[in-house]
Structure formats: C-alpha cells, structure tokens
Amino acid sequence: MLFRTRRSRFLLWLAFGVLFGVVIAAPLAMVGLAAVAGTWNGVLPAEYTARHLADAASGDALASALVSVQTGLVASLAAVLVGTWAALAVRSAPRPVRRVVDTLLHLPVAVPSVVVGLSLLVAFSQPPLALNGTRWIVLVAHLVIVLPFGYGVVSGALDRADPALAEVAASLGAPPALVLWRVRLPLLAPALSASASLSLALSMGEVGATVMLYPPDWRTLPVSVFAQADRGEVFLAAASTVVLLGLTLVGLLTLGLAKGRAAER
Amino acid sequence: MTAVAASVPAVTRPTRVRRRWASVLWLLPPLVVVLGFFCYPLALVLRQSFVTRSGEVSLAVWQQVVTSPEFTAALGRTVLLSLGATAGCVLLGTFLALVLAFAPFPGARVVSRIVDAVLAFPSFLIALAFTFLYGSAGVLNAALGGQGGGPVDFLYGPWGVLLAEVTFYTPFVMRPVLAAFAQVPSAQLDVAASLGARPALVLWRVALPEAWPALASGACLTLLLTMNEFGIVLFVGAKDVITLPMLVHTKGIVTFDYPAACVVAVVNVLLSVALYAAHRWVFRVLGAGRSGEGRRGAVPNPA
C-alpha cells in the first residue's frame, strides 16, 4: 500500500470522488433523470413520469429506433465478415502486401466521420452507382466507419493465437476449408463476438456521417435525437437516448451470451 | 509432432510462391470494399477540391477557402480545442488511473466498469447531458438560484465543448494508463517507499515511467479523435464554435458548396492522418519496444 496514512488516502479519495462525480458520473445520471422527468425547474425534477419514455417507444421515434437496430446489425455483421476475411487472408500474403493492406484497413479510423459522409456523397450521387437518397448509402457509411474496429479486433486475436492447432489439423490431412471451419473460426469465436460488439456499439451511436447522408425514410435514432433536441424537446431527446443505450446494451448482452455458448462448445 | 515438422519442408519452393500469390487473390473481396467505398470516394473528394462550381480545373477554390477568415478561425479553433481537451484528458485520466491502481477503494471495480461503459456510448450523449447540467435552465443554475439565464453561462461556447470532450475522452487515456500501472510490480513500489521515498516521488520515478508509452499513445489517439469530433460540437450547437468537421458539414449540407467542403475535408484528413501516423509510430516504437525490454528485465533468471 503506497499511501499509508489514513489522511492521505482519504484526501486522495475525496479528490477522486469529486472529479469523477462531476466530470463523468453526473452527466450520465442527468440523461437518465431527464428521461423520466415531468417538470424540472429545480435541482431535482419536481415530478417523475414515464410519458417521455412511452413517446420514445412509439411513432416516429420507434421507427427511428428500428432503423438504427437494422443499420447496426447489418453494418456490424458486414464488418465482422469483411474484417475476419481480411484478417485471415492478409496473414498468408507476402510481407509488403500485408503491411499495405493492414494500414489501408485501419485508415478509416483517422478520417473524420463527416468526411466519410461527404466523400460518399461526392462519389455516389452520380452513376455508375447512384446510392445517394437510398438507405444503402447509410449502410455503406456505417460499414466504412466500423470496419477498422471489426478488422482490428480479429487481427489482434490472430496475432496472439497459437497456430499449432491449425497446423496439426492440416498435417492430419484436413483440407484448408475444413481447418478454417472446424479449427480456426471456433478458436476465434471470442474475438468475433468482441468485434461484433464493438462494431454494433459504434454503429448505433454514429452521427457524423449519417447526418450528411440520411434519406427521409432511413433516419437513425441519433439523428432523430438531434432533431428532437434541436426542436427543444429535450426530455424526449433524453428518453430516446435511454432507448438507444438500452437497445445497444441488449445487443451487447446477446453477443456476450453467444460468446459464452461458443466457448462452452 | 515429428510428422508435422517433417511435412513442412516437403512443400517445394515454387508451390509456396504460387500459394502466396493465391493468398493475394483471397484478399481481393475485402480490398474491393475498402478501395471502392473508402479510397475511391476520398480520391474524388481530392479531385473535386480542384474543380470550381462552373467546372474548370484550378486552384481557385483552394485559394479562396484557405485565405477565408472562417477557415483560418476554424483551423485555429480545432487545433486549440483538441490540444486543450487532450491536456485535460491526460491530467484527469492519469490521476483517476493512479487512484484506481494504487489507492483502490471499495467499489473501485464498479467505477472502472462505468468508465468502460462510457467507451461504448455515443459522444453526443455527453453534450445532451450538459444541457441539463449547465444549460441556462440546468441544474447548476437552479442550484445557484438563477431563474431563466442564471450565472453559469459557458456551455454554448468553446469551454462547453472543451469540457464535454474532456468528459467523453478521458476514458481513452485512463484505460491504457490503468493497464500500464497494473504491470508495475507492487514490490518495486514497496521497495522504493521503504527506502524512504515519499509517495509522490515513488509515483513520479517508479510508476509513471512505466506508463509513458501508454500515455503517449493514448494522448495521440485523443488528439486525433478530438480533432475529428463532430457529435459534441453539433449537439452543443454553439454559434461561435466552428471546427473543421463542422465546417465540412455546413459547407456540404447547409450551403451545398461541395468544392469548398472538399478543400476543408482534405485539410482535415491531412491533419488527422499525420496524427494517426504519429499514434501508430508511438505505439510501435515505444509500446512494443519498452514492454518487451521490461519483461526481459523483470525475469533476469528464468531458471
């Protein structure tokens, strides 16, 4: 124990509590509180209501939530698929190819999401591929933004994985496809789940690119939250945010359960 | 196992070379996705920045945008904001990690779980929360007794954005630093303390050096992410806080001036990619090198 005296420890904890409380805990608590606030003129809401949450789970807000869920599922599934494919394929490529591809796949992290949105607008507003105005452009943007994370998680797991099992299977005569399906992918199950979780969480909260691209019939929940807050319906915005976090959490828990079951098998 | 070892040299050289190139073919599908949906659109953005609205190829748009006061103001504001937010995150993140690692309290694990959760949250959540906390009708103003337009009025300016960014990005520094502190053997701290060093000195000379690579890499990442941050700036909605991503948004969506938006986007991407290269470099050189040495040094006698 580095801080031996009770006083030094107490002072340290006090500073920690104040800083953590003010900077991190209070803002998080505020959104939850605002979602159930009826009227709020004092320090705490004067009365509590479930009305905003009910509003956030019906009508336009609900439609938006469903759009977000579908976008998140499609984007994260595609990111895991493309990312895993790339991570597996890049491993057996010659070294220079490997470095270039690895950098390329990580690069979208460094590009602001707004610029990803603008670039897709510039590229796909005209033929050969006129995606602008359709929901596909939103899905593509989400894929581009979450792909580096989906790829990075799987690639990192492959760096740490022991190649011996796959080599043994191959030496016993299993064809590459069988080795991949029965040995390498099951070993990667936890990484696939982590990759999907990260991609899902990022896609569900994406605003920058979506706000540049969304067509009227494909408005994700974060964009709706912004519209609500902009109209001054801040309590509804808070309730919608709580719904967004709840949906994300359900997704993450489901993926966590899937991981647990895969590990058992 | 001998069978495995024996089977490896059996693959002749030409086959291996052929297999290597076959593996490049396998890379094609993911490469098509990245090239088609990421590189090609970015290349078009670069091209568009050299084409005026009337269709001529020239540097006119660049000249016009780069010399405009709104661009220089946005550039300066973006750099200042991200430097300030990163400094705040580094200080706060290191302090929080120090306490969690070296003076843990009951419930410390719950706290680090909360921090993990923040990493999965969208950034606009913080900006929204700030309206309830520090807005003109927010909790703080109510507590200080101001009715409608109280004494606290920093949210809709650069300070509001700065504080929101510090709140959101502190976990990005705290997490890696906490992981680095966990690597410090507590015996080392005890020895230093037993030799008479005061806690501050022990932290400065023993614990912090172990965390420098994590801190440097986390700071680079935070610098990059705060420079590209959009959600917080959009939700705070401050009129006088126009950052580069915000300018791209305004020019692209509000005024539909694609060429000008593309110029701003190119500058923004150049800045971010440079920072990203620095982040990767720090991570590889400092991170990998040091932890490898440290591990070797920690086990001087494997027997």
Image (tube, rainbow, N blue to C red):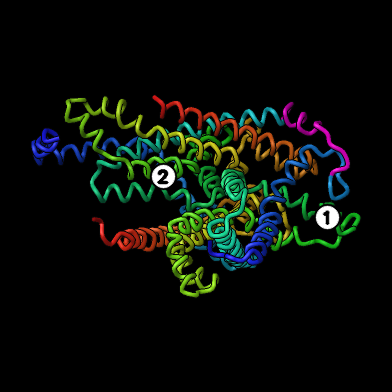
Magenta-colored stretch includes residue B281:
no
Residue type at the position of mark 1: Ser
Indicate left or right for B166 with B281 as reference.
right
What is the magenta range?
Answer: A45-60
Residue A152 disc label: 2
Residue B108 disc label: none
When the figure is inspected, residue B46 is found, relative to residue A249, above or below; the finding is below
In the rendering, at what x and y percent does residue B260 appear?
Answer: 57, 56
- Could you tell me if residue B71 is visible in this image? no
Query: Which residue is located at x 70 percent, y 63 percent?
Result: B159
> Of helix, strand and loop, which one carries label 1?
loop
Magenta-colored stretch includes residue A53:
yes
Residue type at the position of mark 2: Gly
Which residue is denoted by mark 1 in the rendering? B136
When the figure is inspected, residue B2 is found, relative to residue B40, above or below; the finding is above
- Could you tell me if residue B244 is visible in this image? yes
Q: Residues within 10 Å of mark 2 (few under 14, many from 20)?
A: some
